[in-house]
Amino acid sequence: MMKFSEAKGHKVVDKSTASTVGKVRSLLVDPGSCSVAALRLKKSDRGEVLRWGDLIAFGVDAVTIGDPAAITELDGDLKALRGKRGRLLKKRVLTTGGDELGEVSDVEFNPGTGKLTAIFLQDGEIAGERLVNIGSYAVVVKEEPAED
Amino acid sequence: MRLMRTSDIAQRPVVTVAGEDVAQIKDIVYAADGGSVSGFTLAGRGLFAGPLKEGLSWKSVAALGADAVMIADEAALEPTDSVLGRSRGGEGSHGNVLGSQVLTEDGVALGTVHDVVVAVDSSQDGQCDVVGYEIVASDQMGTQGDKVLIPLPDTMAASGEHLMVPTSVRDFVGHDLAGFGAAVERFREHLGGAQ
């Protein structure tokens, strides 16, 4: 598993030329599937986004891609994720019961699938399977089962 | 079951399960018999947003928490008139009690109503019951000016000027919400036994 804070700054390497074509600036999250939809890049001549499906791997030290042409400008469905909706850090977390748990301080994801696996708050963490949805106002998570 | 002051519910955001804030609570609408909350009127989000044409009836509330009122989606909202319509006929019995004098059956004024306490049952078909009032105590209570909680019977008489409560309510006064739920239960049990 990898945290967003660790993923930031990863270099993006083109497999065919073995050269660095950019660096990860941030991750765009798809609220519906609660997974990483794309990477936003910096220091890239070709564009600024790379869709998750175009990656070969999100490795420990680098992101590898097969074709730099996959790097495009931010448009279409991804544009909607750039704003408040696709951002997670510092967003409030609400349970389905209407209680606020805190603010997101970091997010953990599975580098193999892009699926979010945990949300970290200033104090405590929330398992990825409790995620319900990500909205512009709050990240909604399932209520913790009542303690006996 | 969870107790809340209705003054704390006002201004709370109304949030969909998708995490979008679509409104905030403006006023509490009480059922015709006054014993429960039947819904809410709403205002838009933001400092300068005015009242909305839509309201929220209690049956469309998925959960009422400490920080937000959760709904499934925006389809849960309905015209404010239809939310208000359900409470017509008994207006004023609980809806407009703030400032009323609480009077026991033996004629002692306990204080004036400062806030309404509800018990929220978030389960399916759960109610939002009016279970008590927070009152500013009179000198009869020995702690003049203090805010104390008094439990309510299921039904009671209210005129807008006075609220009549059983004399025995004085034995069940609470000082914070934490232990108040138990006091309400004991009080209602006590009344049930007396009848």
Image: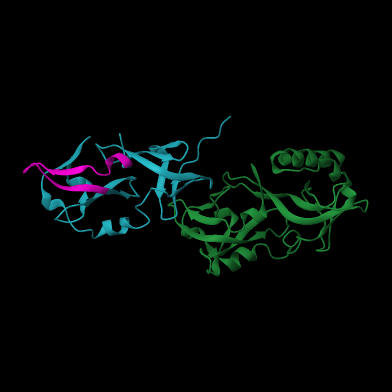
Chain colours: A cyan, B green
**x 32%, y 50%: residue:** A30
Work out which quarter of the rendered image holds the C terminus of chain A and state it: top right
Q: Is residue B185 left or right of residue B41?
A: right
Name the spot of residue A137 as percent of width and height, x first: 44, 55
Name the spot of residue B89 as percent of width and height, x first: 72, 65
Quarter of the image holding residue A60?
A: top left
**x 56%, y 45%: residue:** B124
User: B22 or B187: nearer the eye?
Assistant: B22
Residue B35 showing in the rendered view: no
Quarter of the image holding residue A75?
A: bottom left
Work out which quarter of the rendered image holds the N terminus of chain A and state it: top left
Residue B82 showing in the rendered view: yes
**Residue B134 colored magenta?**
no
User: A115 or A87: nearer the eye?
Assistant: A87
Which portion, as a residue range, is magenta? Answer: A5-25
Pick out the residue farthest to the top. Answer: A148
In this rendering, the answer to whether A62 lies above or below A74 is above
Pick out the residue farthest to the left. Answer: A17
Q: Is residue B43 left or right of residue A76?
A: right
Name the spot of residue B85 as percent of width and height, x first: 64, 66
**x 17%, y 46%: residue:** A54
In this rendering, the answer to whether A42 lies above or below A106 is below
**Residue A16 colored magenta?**
yes
